[in-house]
Image (spheres, rainbow, N blue to C red):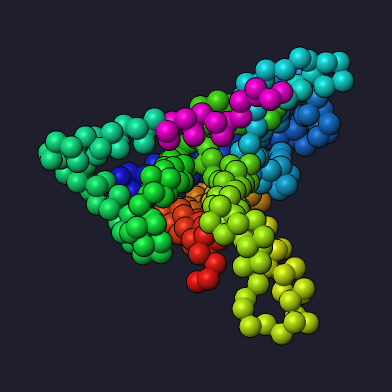
């Protein structure tokens, strides 16, 4: 599967190098007049002509370096693909609470895939029969239960939390992994494309709710176990000198908000940064082609750019699982520490 994805990535990168010279690199004697006319035409006229035809100017040799990378990076920002709001004169694209962003469909796809994958796993525990793939997923489930939940919370306390952390871990994994599938036709706010694949965890609007759920469980279960005043009293380590108690309480109280903030930024930043580096490497192909005027040597400069994109892609395939593990494992530790403050 990984080899297939790598081949698709290589194909997309090489396709860009084939198309770009064809747009502006063929320099024949019959094209000299056309090139002279293009040179004398102002950039404003190009933009006006593009606007008149209803699409932005995308000719590589006529774009600035900033425009090249802006096009590469703009798909990393969530954008609405379906608006359900009243259009006003001042804001014709007003976003309402029922607006669907390109993040949402891929979260629904992940939920559907999880149902399709883990329903046979659940049935296999009851029937005792399982194929090879189901046995592999059963092994993952047992690993999450024994090596993540039970190793921190213990079997007695952790049993009640196993279903929640199952869902949290595998939902993050599915969202991270599905973002590795190469996709073309990425859009933007002005030109949305509903079916372009998007990494849902590459935005804080997705990772922050997960972190807030962890914070709510920390506070709720901690207060339930230790009482309201007992919970906040337990934030302060025992045996501290009296003058340090107010300062330590402030530090520990602030750390309650820092923990979910760190969970949010760690997952979102790691998932987004890998995509940005790959997009930058592909953007270099366009940039070098523009710098060389679309000459045949553009193929040579494309090779190291493609190699860099593939290298980062391989690393990102590992990071998808690692970041889901870190987020889930830290959540387990934070919740356990809130419940058992004496530890």
Give the x, y percent position of residue 341: 54, 67
- Check the image and report above or below for 205 versus 301: above
Q: Residue at x 30, y 37 (%)?
A: 118
The quadrant in which the N terminus is found is: top left
Residue 254 located left or right of residue 156:
right
x 76%, y 23%: residue: 94
Residue appearing at x 24%, y 52% in the figure: 139
Q: Nearer the viewer, residue 111 or 163?
A: 163
Residue drawn where x is 41% and y is 54% of the image: 321
Question: On the picture, is 97 further left or further right than 198?
Answer: right
In the rendered structure, does residue 168 fall within the stretch colored magenta?
no
Which portion, as a residue range, is magenta?
96-111
- Residue 16 picture location, percent across and down: 52, 40
Tell me if I can see residue 314 in this picture: no
Residue 212 in the image: x percent, y percent?
61, 47
Q: Nearer the viewer, residue 180 or 300?
A: 180
């Amino acid at each position: 599967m990984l080899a297939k994805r790598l081949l698709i990535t290589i194909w997309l990168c090489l396709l860009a190098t084939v198309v770009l010279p064809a747009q502006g690199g063929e320099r024949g004697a019959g094209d000299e007049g056309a090139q002279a006319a293009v040179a004398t035409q102002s950039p404003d006229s190009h933009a006006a002509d593009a606007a008149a035809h209803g699409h932005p100017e995308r000719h590589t040799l006529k774009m600035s370096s900033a425009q090249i990378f802006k096009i590469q990076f703009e798909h990393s920002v969530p954008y609405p693909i379906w608006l359900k709001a009243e259009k006003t004169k001042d804001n014709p694209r007003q976003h309402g609470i029922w607006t669907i962003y390109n993040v949402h469909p891929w979260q629904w796809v992940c939920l559907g895939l999880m149902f399709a994958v883990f329903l046979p796993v659940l049935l296999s525990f009851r029937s005792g029969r399982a194929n090879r793939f189901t046995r592999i997923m059963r092994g993952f489930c047992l690993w999450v239960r024994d090596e993540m939940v039970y190793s921190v919370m213990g079997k007695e306390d952790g049993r009640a939390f196993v279903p929640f952390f199952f869902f949290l871990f595998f939902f993050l994994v599915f969202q991270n992994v599905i973002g590795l599938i190469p996709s073309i036709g990425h859009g933007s706010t002005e030109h949305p494309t509903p079916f372009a694949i998007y990494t849902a965890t590459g935005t804080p609007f997705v990772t922050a709710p997960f972190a807030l759920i962890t914070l709510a469980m920390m506070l709720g279960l901690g207060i339930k176990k230790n009482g309201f005043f007992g919970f906040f009293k337990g934030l302060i380590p025992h045996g501290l000198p009296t003058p340090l108690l107010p300062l330590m309480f402030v530090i520990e109280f602030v750390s309650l908000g820092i923990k979910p903030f760190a969970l949010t930024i760690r997952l979102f930043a790691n998932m987004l940064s890998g995509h940005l580096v790959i997009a930058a490497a592909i953007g270099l192909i366009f940039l070098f082609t523009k710098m060389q005027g679309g000459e045949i040597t553009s193929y040579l400069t494309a090779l190291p750019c493609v190699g860099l994109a593939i290298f980062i892609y391989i690393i990102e395939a590992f990071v998808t699982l690692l970041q889901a593990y870190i987020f889930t494992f830290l959540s387990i530790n934070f919740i356990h520490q809130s419940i058992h403050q004496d530890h």
